[in-house]
Each structure stands twice: as C-alpha cells, then as structure tokens.
Amino acid sequence: MRTKDQGPGTRDQQPKTLARVCLWSLVLGLWALVFSATAAAVEAETMAERTFKKIAGRQRELLAEAAKQGDNLDEGNFKTQVQSLIHDYELLLRENPKYAAGYAAYGYLLGKVGMRRESTAMLLKANQLDPDIALVKNQLGNHLAEEGKPREAVNYFLAAIKLEPNEPLYHYQLGTLLAEARDDFLKGGEWTRAGLDQSMRKAFQRAAELAPDRFEFAYRYAECFYDLQVPDWDTALKLWAALEEKAPTPVERQTMRLHAANILFKSGKAAHARALLDTVDEPALQNQKQKLVAQFVETAKK
C-alpha cells in the first residue's frame, strides 16, 4: 500500500536485492538460535534432540544455499532435499508429538516452500506447546498479514516484541505492517491516525537503533516520514544525510541526495533543493531526478 505523499520515485532505487538478502540472513540466524536453544533445553529427549539438530542443520544449509543461488537454483534437487526433510520431520514428530522446536522448524520450512496452510498448522502447534518462542509468533504474524488479516497479525508481532524486545526484526515487521495496512487499522477504530503514525515511526526507529549495521532498517526509518500525516522533515533530512555518508556506492549516495532534495523542497527550501539536485549526475538516477524537477515545477505553478 502506497500513501499519497511518497518520496521522489526513489523507493524503487533502494538496493532491494541487498535488503532481501540481509533480512533473509537475519531470519536464518534467528531460526538457528531458536533451533539450538530449544533443542538444548529438551534434556529428557536426548535422541530427539540429536535428531532434531541434524535435521535443523540440513534445513539451514539448504535454505541458505537456495537464497544464495537465487534464479540459478536447481529446483529438482531442491525439491528432493525438501522432501527428505519433510519425511524426517514427520518421523521425528510422530515419535515426539510434544516437541515444540520440531513443530516450529518444520512450520518454517513448509512456509518457505509455499505450503502456507500446513506451515500455519505446525506453527500454531509449536505456539500451543511453547508460547514463549518469539520467532514463531513473528512468523504467524507474517502469515496473517499476507492473508490480509493485519488486525490479527499485529497481536502476534506485539507478542514477539514483548518476548524479545531487543530483536530488531520484530520492530521492523511491526512498522511495516502498520504502514502497509494503515487503512485497515483506521477502519477498525482501535487506532487513531496520530497513534498509528507514532507507533509506526517508533517501530522503525527502534529497529534502526537496535541494528545500526543494517542499512535497510535505517533506510526504511528515514523513508517512513513520507508516510506520516504530520512529517518531521528536519529529522528526516538528518537521517538521509547520515545514510548518504554510510552508502557504499555513488548511486546509493546520490539516491539519498534525491530524498534530501525532495524534503528540502517540501520544507520550503526550493533553491537549496535545486542546488542539491544539480549534484546528482549518476545516469541511473536521471529519470528519478527529472521526475523531481517536474514535480517542483508543477508545484511552483500552483
């Protein structure tokens, strides 16, 4: 869902592939921690623990390699390995029907291979057996959000944050949900626009604070000011300037500069905005630059 006051057409210029890889790596890392921590806690099921660790290890390696290969993935080999994992999970859970870690990891795998209904069932079972696995709640929230049920999803995201308040991913997911499903929340009557804006901004800000090395979190925090009904342009401008300093490539640095120019114009500093636009000379950004120039001209006529 896009709001009416978006950026200068530069959202599409965000290094989205890098962002997806970073988020993918973060999620895999979190699941690795859940797998090991939960398995280690099950002292009474030594054989189950040993079996689970082997399955979970194979799953991590398979999904990480699939993410790395991207469009070059050998789908036949991937499906064969997934079927092997499914078989092993079914056997493990048949012999250990109260093993929450197994249901959690199995549910995550099923979700990654498109078996959404089966994945949700496994995650709900894991949540029933152990209500303190934050990543399970986050994953259930993702499923509900993707099914168009944001008002149900938000409770799972909030529960995940309550369990692990210092995990940046959960704050990021909450902020994303509040931004993309704003109309649904406002229609429900539980939220006011001011309250929703404040919660969304706080969520993105907290994610960026907790993971200062995550460029995509800082980017989305800066970007969220376009979504606010009453934007704080001064703060947004500082954030884009800071991002420009951190950006690794000329294209990315000048992308941040386009955002800064847009905000300067919105703040009534047209001359400064045009001067900044003059410094954007990357060929890949000329289309976005011209859109901004046209926008400035059109606004000046009104």
Image (tube, helix red, strand yellow):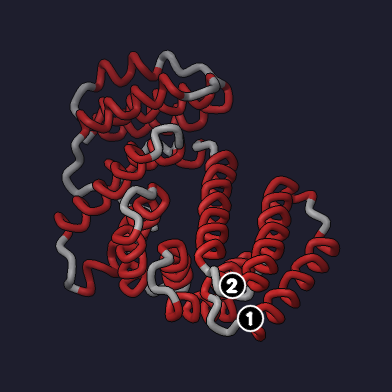
Instruction: Name the residue located 16 percent from the left edge and 57 percent from the top edge.
Output: 195
Q: Is residue 238 left or right of residue 62?
A: left
Residue type highlighted by circle 2: Gly
Q: Which mark is residue 93?
A: 1
Q: Are marks 2 and 1 in contact (CB under 8 Å)?
A: yes
Q: Position of residue 72 (x, y in %)?
A: 79, 49
- Work out how far the residue at label 2 is from the one at label 1, CA to CA, in angstroms: 7 Å
Q: Position of residue 94 (x, y in %)?
A: 66, 85
Q: Which sits in the foreground, 50 or 208? A: 50
Q: Is residue 14 above or below residue 73?
A: above
Q: Which mark is residue 110?
A: none
Residue type highlighted by circle 1: Leu
Instruction: Name the residue located 50 percent from the left edge and 26 percent from the top edge.
Output: 252
Q: Is residue 6 left or right of residue 42?
A: left
Q: Earlier in the sequence, mark 2 or mark 1?
A: 1
Q: Is residue 142 above or below residue 18?
A: below
Tag 2's secondary structure? helix
Q: Which residue is mark 2?
A: 102
Image quarter of residue 292: top left
Q: Quadrant of the N terminus?
A: bottom left
- Is there any visible trace of residue 232 in the rendered image? yes
Image quarter of residue 186: bottom left
Q: Position of residue 41 (x, y in %)?
A: 50, 65
Instruction: Name the residue located 54 percent from the left edge and 69 percent from the top edge.
Output: 43
Q: Is residue 297 above or below residue 150?
A: above
Within-10-Å neighbours for mark 1: few <14, some 14–19, many 20+: some
